[in-house]
Image (cartoon, helix red, strand yellow):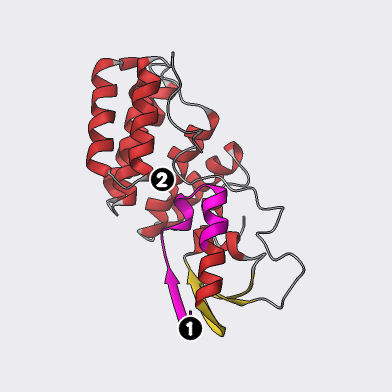
Amino acid sequence: PGFQVIFCQNLLFYMIKSEVANALREMRRLLTPQGWLFLDGASSCFARGMFTHVQKGNIHGFQIAPPKSSATIAPDVVFKSAFVPELDGMPQPGTPPEDRLLQEANRLYRLKEFRQADERLDQLIVDFPRQLAQGLLGKARILADEGSDMEAMELAEQALQAHEQGDSLLSREEQAAGCAIIAMALHNKGLKQASSLWFERLRRLDARHPALSLEGGRA
């Protein structure tokens, strides 16, 4: 404890709700009373119930809010991971092999074991062609997490195309994840007009997706 400044980027966005709360409590504990926490724009909505939010342009700063009876994440914030749905632990007995592979890949992804997760996804695509879209989306998540935005965008587009053609179906949440990857990649490259089209598509799928906070504060 005693840090005057904490920078946290590209972390909270990938956590499940309980992990976000724990991380924010720990960062609050580590800050001095007048210290600053800086978050990326996509994660800024998660801290507003526990900290005082100050924004200037794309910079999101937070200071410890005045004591409350129950300082916690604002209850109206519905958290969804940017790229991967929340999982309910390990695969259960009787889980179909394709679902087992996907769940194992997602588990490894959360542990940042990207190479092993990618291998599981390759196996999924080869062994179960009907899971092509989910496999491509999983690989796109990994590339996005590694900072390879354009490659991630390409795979996300392929995943959505496979879904639209009916070759391999994605859930509504998975479609939103694909749109988020594309919108964020275009936004990060400064292609605001192109990204706005994908943000709008994302909004139609999930009006409260955290990636929308990047779009000029419109979320």
Q: Viewer-proximal residue, 19 or 115?
A: 19
Say which residue label 1 marks. Answer: 2
Q: Secondary structure at mark 2?
A: helix
Q: Is residue 114 left or right of residue 3?
A: left
Mark 2 crowd level (few <14, some 14–19, many ≥20, 10 Å Cα): many
In the rendered structure, find residue 78 and report the number of the disc placed on it: none
Q: Is residue 11 magenta?
A: yes
Residue displayed at 47% across by 33% down: 89
First in residue order: circle 2 vs circle 1:
1
Q: Is residue 171 magenta?
A: no
Say which residue label 2 marks. Answer: 181
Residue displayed at 50% across by 75% down: 30
Amino acid type of the residue tagged 2 in the rendering: Ile
User: CA separation, marks 2 and 1?
Assistant: 36 Å
Q: Which residues are magenta?
A: 1-23
- In the rendered image, the vertical position of residue 123 relative to residue 29, given as above or below: above
Q: Position of residue 74 (x, y in %)?
A: 69, 58
Q: Residue 46 is drawn in which quadrant?
A: bottom right
Q: Position of residue 12 (x, y in %)?
A: 48, 57
Q: Position of residue 5 (x, y in %)?
A: 46, 81
Q: Is residue 60 left or right of residue 115?
A: right
Residue displayed at 56% across by 50% down: 18
Mark 2 vs mark 1, foreground winner is: 1
Can residue 168 be seen? yes
Q: Is residue 6 left or right of residue 34?
A: left
Q: Residue 29 is drawn in which quadrant?
A: bottom right
Q: Position of residue 181 (x, y in %)?
A: 41, 45
- In the rendered image, the vertical position of residue 93 relative to residue 137, given as above or below: above
Can residue 157 be seen? no
Image quarter (top left, top right, bottom left or bottom right) of the C terminus:
bottom right
Tag count: 2
